[in-house]
Amino acid sequence: MTDFTRKDLEEIIDVARGSKKADLLIKNGKVINVFNESVEDADVLIHKGIVVGIGKYDNAEKVIDVQGSYVAPGFTDAHMHIESTMSIPPVFAQAVLPLGTTTAVIDPHEIANVAGIPGIQFMINSSEGLPIDIYFMLSSCVPSTPLETSGAHLYAEDLAIFKNHPRVLGLAELMNYPGLLAKVPEVIDKVAKFRDRIIDGHAPGLSGHNLNAYLSAGVMADHECTVPKEAEEKLSKGMWIMMREGSLTRDVLRLLPIINERTKHRIMLCTDDKHPEDLVYEGHVNFAIHLLIKNGIPLPLAVRLATLNSANFFGFRRKGGIAPGYDADIVIFKDILKIEKVFKNGKLVAESGKPLFEFKRELHDDAVKNTINIKPVTFEKLEIKDEGKKIRVIGIHPDTILTDEMIFEPKVKDGKVVSDTERDIIKIAVIERHKATGNVGLGFIHGLGLKKGAFATSVAHDSHNIIVAGENDRDMLLAVAQIEAMGGGVAIAKEGKILGSLPLPYGGLMTNKPITETAETLLSLHKIAKEENGLSVSDPFMTLAFMSLPVIPKLKLTDKGLVDVDKFDFVSLFKEE
């Protein structure tokens, strides 16, 4: 909220004392008090966009009787990438406000890897003036590693351009922890530039002295814990933990044991990466709260993890609770999965699952359009000549982006290593799409269940080159050609035909279409992938998208080759005996 004048404050005092009419009164609610973790039968009085009273009131211009529904603070997503919703910021706002999310702290890492500084500026500009607070953490790892080709390279001085923007809070997930520990100057410079601000972490498995060094540099939080032991060590060393419930990475139930009286004030909720179909049919932060409640966490505490704790961590001094003087960001519900009303600064912005605002769908977007720039890919580029040795294969873990290194005897045909559908060993390729270098990384993956055809996407963390998996090379090339023709997106091919596709023209990552339309298209593609291509993973597109992320162990593939993340170096597809 903007600063109040003396007259404003005098009026607020009179309204709070009951001697003047308020703008709005929410009556007969069960108010969730996140400060003392209780539920109170009370009215909530709102004036000039803030809460001015809790208790019994009657004097207001507008009265809404919520008839015993819960009245909670608006929810905060403590760490997420809007690009993963495949929607530009205004569409994202229309999707999550009806789900109770009134604040999101985002890392524009994906578009930054594609379009650099102009990409970040696009996200800031297009999120301006929306009835949701979108704050930014500046992307610390563009590219995430030197093991891939990205569309941009951001240095400390580049990020410093945005440091004093009012919606910029600090430095986003520092995933290149090997670079920090190795004292790589470029990484150190970024941390030094932002050590006076919030620095978010990303350090799966980091422990002991290495964790001490990481934290000493200035990192404050982590969202990559997947087991309680890891989270408990990090909590004990002063870190804040973000319990993540995204589309592929689902950690809330795994981390349930870490919530107790000693730790509850330093735990937050986030989604990180949430696909549009999951947003539409499952929920956002409200879904994570639902999981907590369903598994024994009291409602006030579950709500606190999504409100007050995040506000305390990020320094939102008047957010995160329903109390006099706090912003009137308020969510009304009987069932957390069926939000009834959402207020932002005291104004009704969503009701019965529908947003109550519009936006101009055509934005100033030249910097993030037409970003697919590939050198023609030929059959020869996809061929893998047999070397008479076993091969390294990426092994998928269900519901996580961790992978295994698996060793198999390859299937060989005409002197070339090919996909083996009987053993579920499928060829994958990563094709550089920013600078037309002609780079093509080749490998194999186990766990997709693909039987026929191929599928590809330009959403491929973190550098967002084109990644494709296929049972045969012809369909792989066809799927890639379809993505090039669309300016980015998702495509499925079989027997020389495109079976379905989703255009994502904004950076090859996002669309301006309504999120329900995007979700329906994706569900249709999921059905095609399962019925026509035989895929067995729950979300093949998001699964494939993370197979090129060379900062999450163990084995990944980039446009430059196969990466052993533990060694932080390339390894050969063929394993020496």
Image (tube, rainbow, N blue to C red):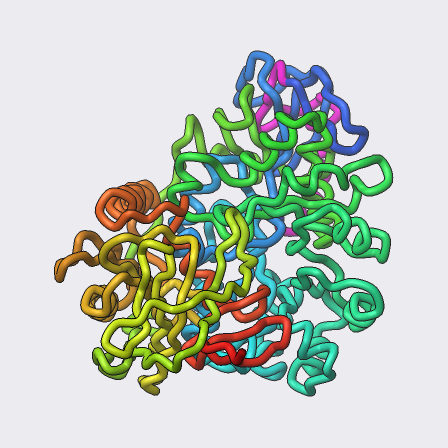
Left or right of 167? Residue 531 is left
Give the residue at x 55% y 17%. Answer: 66
Relative image position of residue 513 (x, y in whole percent): 29, 50
Q: Can residue 147 be seen in this view?
A: yes
Q: Which residue lies furthest to the left in this view?
A: 496
Q: Nearer the viewer, residue 337 or 332?
A: 337
Left or right of 46? Residue 511 is left
Span colored in magenta? 2-29
Tell me: residue 82, above or below residue 371. above
| Magenta region includes residue 14 | yes
Q: Which of 231 and 67 is in front in this view?
A: 231
Tell me: residue 35, above or below residue 44. below
Give the residue at x 58% y 61%. Answer: 136
Left or right of 253? Residue 537 is left
Give the residue at x 45% y 79%. Answer: 561
Q: Can residue 48 be seen in this view?
A: no
Relative image position of residue 107 (x, y in whole percent): 55, 62
| Magenta region includes residue 332 | no
Relative image position of residue 75 (x, y in whole percent): 60, 39
Q: Nearer the viewer, residue 132 or 373?
A: 373
